[in-house]
Image: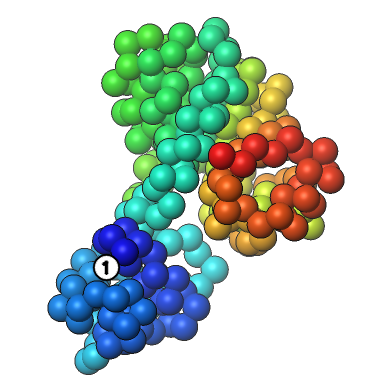
Amino acid sequence: MDSAERMDVIVARLRSEGEVGVVELAELTGHSEMTIRRDLGHLSGQGVLRRVRGGAVSLLPRGQEPPYAIRERQAVDAKKRIGEAVGGLVGDGQAVLLDSGTTVLEAARELAGRHVTVMPLSLRGAAALSEGRTAKLLMAGGEVRPGELSLIGPLAEASLGAVRFDTAVLGCCGLSAADGVTAYDLGDVAIKRAAMRSAQRVVLAVDSTKLGQVAMGHVGPVSEIDILVTDTDAPDDDVAGIRAAGVTVHRV
């Protein structure tokens, strides 16, 4: 189990139990207590937890998204495969809108060297796209969310309203056949809704951990998605329900 996998275990335990113990985590991961203490120190520096004697307690607010620095270390290989698959769905010459988030960022990296026109809704996405020499980069206005570096607010929504895209590539915090597409931040919800309205086709790029989850903000029903790209760990029952709503699902 590498460092990223240990972090996943620790964060998952914090979210489910609210606290973790060094001895328990050492047994669970097969690593030494010294290694676990280093991991806890790293997460403490990111504001994820508070160290206590023998372990740590969670500082992750219930009902809120984990910090970007944690999410970018999770399901890394799956997100790269999803980003590559999304890139394969985009044809040369298309106008593409890219949402914020760690999975969609991989799609931005795939499109950086393509002959496409792209409007990213995050500063990280813009930086990734600017590294290529062929993609035409458009920038939206808006307020920058601290930590996320995504664009939200009336200026961002107005930017989306002024353009029509062939494809919008979105991420989300939760997805289910019953509750649809959901997100934690209400400003992010409004941007995702505007993105859906501005595009002929909506592609949702999310790793399997988001399936079956429900966040507070409702973006829209699952039927508003045209294509879902997720990984091979996506639960069969969730995938079947989403397909039944008329969504094309790619598991990569």
Toward the viewer: 5 or 199?
5
| Observer able to see residue 173 | yes
- Rendering quarter of residue 214: bottom right
Residue appearing at x 76%, y 38% in the figure: 247
For label 1, the SS is helix
Residue appearing at x 39%, y 47% in the figure: 76
Residue appearing at x 39%, y 70% in the figure: 9
Please tell me whether residue 65 is drawn above or below residue 223 in the rendered image: below
* Residue 216 appears left or right of 46: right
**What is the count of numbered marks?**
1
Of the 4 image quadrants, the one containing the N terminus is bottom left
Toward the viewer: 173 or 160?
173
Toward the viewer: 112 or 237?
237
- Rendering quarter of residue 251: top right
Expressed as whole percent of the image width and height from the top left, the position of residue 230 reads 59, 43
Please tell me whether residue 133 is drawn above or below residue 17 in the rendered image: above
Q: Which residue is mark 1?
A: 43
Most extreme residue toward the bottom is 53
Mark 1 neighbour density, 10 Å: few (under 14) some (14–19) many (20 or more): many
Of the 4 image quadrants, the one containing the C terminus is top right
Please tell me whether residue 63 is drawn above or below residue 53 in the rendered image: above
Expressed as whole percent of the image width and height from the top left, the position of residue 83 reads 48, 34
Residue type, numbered disc 1: Leu
| Observer able to see residue 155 | no
Please tell me whether residue 211 is drawn above or below residue 113 in the rendered image: below
